[in-house]
């Protein structure tokens, strides 16, 4: 089943909720609240996946989205929507919610990662000289 136009994609996601669909890279990105969690390429839908959702998708015989660039294959963290879900709206909505959760987790900074702090701006030399003079008095 091909879902390659924004209206059919929004209709498929209707049991999940309201989504926006934007043209991207020759396909479409599917967004909720500005966060992309699914994509369409060549009429196939793919859901955002991570370590928590990949086992569930793999159990459905799903595979990752792979594209060729500069003579090599690149796999993204999106997995093909299992065929049965096109006809099972409630199960589809659950998988879509899982994909949105994976997108949210991917957007959060990794735990233990230090926040980058900007170095303080150096004071103009005239202020540094003035401070030194005031300390001498």
Image (tube, helix red, strand yellow):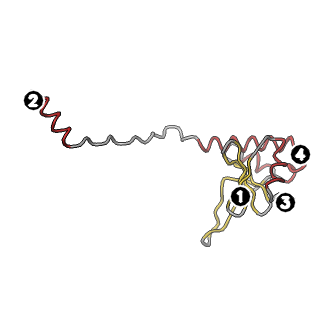
Give the spatial CA distance, label 2 vs label 4: 80 Å
Q: Mark 4 and mark 1: span between their CA atoms?
A: 26 Å
**Which comes before the other along the chain, label 3 or label 4?**
3
Mark in front: 3 vs 4: 3
Q: What residue sits right under mark 1 in the picture?
A: 23
Q: Earlier in the sequence, mark 3 or mark 2?
A: 3
Q: Nearer the viewer, residue 116 or 8?
A: 8
Please give the residue where the numbered disc 2 appears in the rendered image: 136
Query: What is the distance, in whole Å, between disc 3 and disc 4 at their CAs?
Result: 16 Å
Closer to the eye: label 3 or 1: 1
Marks 1/2: CA–CA distance: 66 Å
Name above or below for residue 76 compared with residue 120. Answer: below
Q: Read off the residue under disc 4.
A: 88
Question: Do residues under tags 3 and 2 come within 8 Å of each other at their CB atoms?
Answer: no
Which one is in front in this view, the residue at disc 4 or the one at disc 1?
A: 1
Q: Which mark is drawn over residue 126?
A: none
Asked whether the residues under the numbered discs 1 and 2 touch, taking CB atoms below 8 Å apart as contact, a structural biologist would say: no
13 relative to 70 in the view: left or right: right
């Amino acid at each position: 089943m091909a879902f390659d136009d924004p209206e059919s994609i929004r209709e498929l996601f209707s049991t999940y909720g309201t989504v926006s669909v934007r043209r991207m890279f020759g396909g479409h990105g599917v967004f909720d609240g500005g966060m992309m969690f699914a994509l369409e390429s060549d009429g196939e839908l793919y859901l955002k996946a991570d370590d928590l959702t990949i086992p569930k998708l793999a159990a459905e015989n799903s595979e990752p989205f792979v594209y060729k660039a500069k003579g090599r294959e690149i796999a993204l963290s999106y997995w093909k929507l299992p065929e049965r879900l096109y006809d099972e709206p409630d199960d589809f909505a659950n998988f879509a919610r899982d994909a949105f959760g994976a997108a949210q987790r991917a957007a959060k900074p990794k735990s233990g990662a230090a926040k980058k702090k900007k170095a303080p701006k150096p004071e103009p030399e005239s202020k540094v000289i003035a401070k030194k003079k005031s300390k001498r008095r």
